Image (cartoon, grey):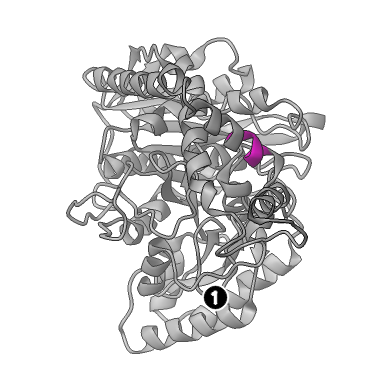
Amino acid sequence: MHTKTLKQLSALLQTKQVSATELARHFLQRIDASDLNAFLHVDAGLTLAQAAAADARLARGDSTALTGIPIAHKDIFVTRDWRATAGSKMLENYISPFDATVVERFNSAGMVTLGKLNCDEFAMGSSNQNSHFGPVRNPWDKLAIPGGSSGGSAAAIAARLSPAATATDTGGSIRQPASLCGVTGIKPTYGRVSRFGMIAFASSLDQAGPIAQTAEDCALLLNAMAGFDPRDSTSLERADEDFTRDLQRDVRGLRIGVPREYFGEGLAPDVEQAVRAALAEYEKLGATLVDISLPKTALSIPVYYVIAPAEASSNLSRFDGVRYGHRAEHYGDLSDMYKRTRAEGFGEEVKLRILVGAYVLSHGYYDAYYLQAQKIRRLIAEDFKQAFTQCDVIMGPVSPTVAWDLGEKVDDPVANYLADIFTLSTSLAGLPGMSIPCGFGQGEKNSRRPVGLQLIGNYFEEAKLLNIAHQYQLATGWHQMQPLA
């Protein structure tokens, strides 16, 4: 059962060849046997109760395409019954009184929650080593990181612990772990999916999206996820779409923009080889490659690491030990309680970003750093606008390298930040982007580690991206490959 796609599982459920309860038990057994540390909270009783409700819906014919299918949620989404920790000691035992809109939508569709997935603390990181609850391991090589911050989501899909997972992308945190774990993930246009109930990192960048085995799976999940939410001030009012509508359209005549900045110094040869081979496959399918330039690509790193920490320092000020979450046991006055609570509750990476954010927003530095970063952000968006006059979609690598070893870059934050060089600009511009498996590179001791192809579309062109990805997956088998463990 765990090797099947969402469409295949849906067909089995609808024809009563398997029940939602049987399916849930199957995945719960796989989770229980796993040593990847992908899940932070599993409650079989809650899961099986949802599965029983899904079976009742299926029996009376009141079901959707997703009813009865298991899903796991990144622990950045608040949930009524499961813990919502954001991977932090600050929220170690927190249970929300309400569900995030994304969780609510999947519950309404009749999906069955398997549990909550590990992530970098408050979604800050590219390796999933910043979680208070320990790192997630990459199922392709357990000595390797899975990518971050949605590493638990990507690892769970790759290891077939769940057929579907939610994730969030602030600077690449859906696409990069999807790439390093050899699965499919899509970051929608900013504002497509509600942020209500998503524990905030950087409010002008955070966007939720799905990770699954295939582009078709992601399209089905996005159908349920996307939509206007009046509770989210950044949610966009657009008519509902069927993101599966164009999946069967061929790609003949498609103009693929290949940014020269994505293939320069720093790109590992094994990654470039896999990406070039994927581009050649698209040419076989009838697409044309167009040389383009995104000249502000290198500036995306300093811009992101000014804007994101600034917004994080503001968003995380609410965690002060007063209303909810961790509170220091011993303190003097109120000020001392704030200091001790935050010192104990936050990890080192979160503290670093809060300090950077407070600095760039401080009097005397706001104009020099934050304001300038916002101006360059607009120029980065203009680069993409110009590029899309020459092409229909942009393609290139997701990450400069395959997954690195656990512990390899923990003492070098800049090296970690550079791993996001190809994903940050898309997030800064608010554009939709995808990662699909396209091959393997070489890890330590000759282990095979996945490589992802990045697809970037114009605003609100998720259906087009999913179609382009689906056609590649019909022609290749990279997305069907599974780790041995």
Up-down relation of residue 95 to residue 276 (above or below)? below
Q: Is residue 300 magenta?
A: no
For the question of whether residue 194 can be seen, the reply is yes
Q: Which residue is drawn at 38% across and 83% down?
A: 58
Q: Does the magenta stretch include residue 351?
A: yes
Kind of residue at badge 1: Asp
Q: Where residue 438 appears, x then y in whole percent?
A: 52, 34
Q: Which residue is drawn at 49% across and 59% down?
A: 77
Q: Where residue 3 appears, x then y in whole percent?
A: 57, 60
Q: Residue at x 62, y 32 (%)?
A: 440
The residue lying toward the viewer, choosing from 264 and 479, is 264
Instruction: Look at mark 1 in the image and give the residue it sits on.
Output: 81
In the picture, which quadrant includes the N terminus? bottom right
Instruction: Write down the region rendered in magenta.
Output: 349-353
Q: Residue at x 56, y 45 (%)?
A: 123
For the question of whether residue 276 can be seen, the reply is no
Query: Residue extending furthest left?
Result: 239
Query: Residue extending furthest right?
Result: 445
Q: What element carries label 1?
A: loop
Up-down relation of residue 436 to residue 234 (above or below)? above
The residue lying toward the viewer, choosing from 295 and 306, is 306
The residue lying toward the viewer, choosing from 134 and 452, is 134
Numbered disc total: 1
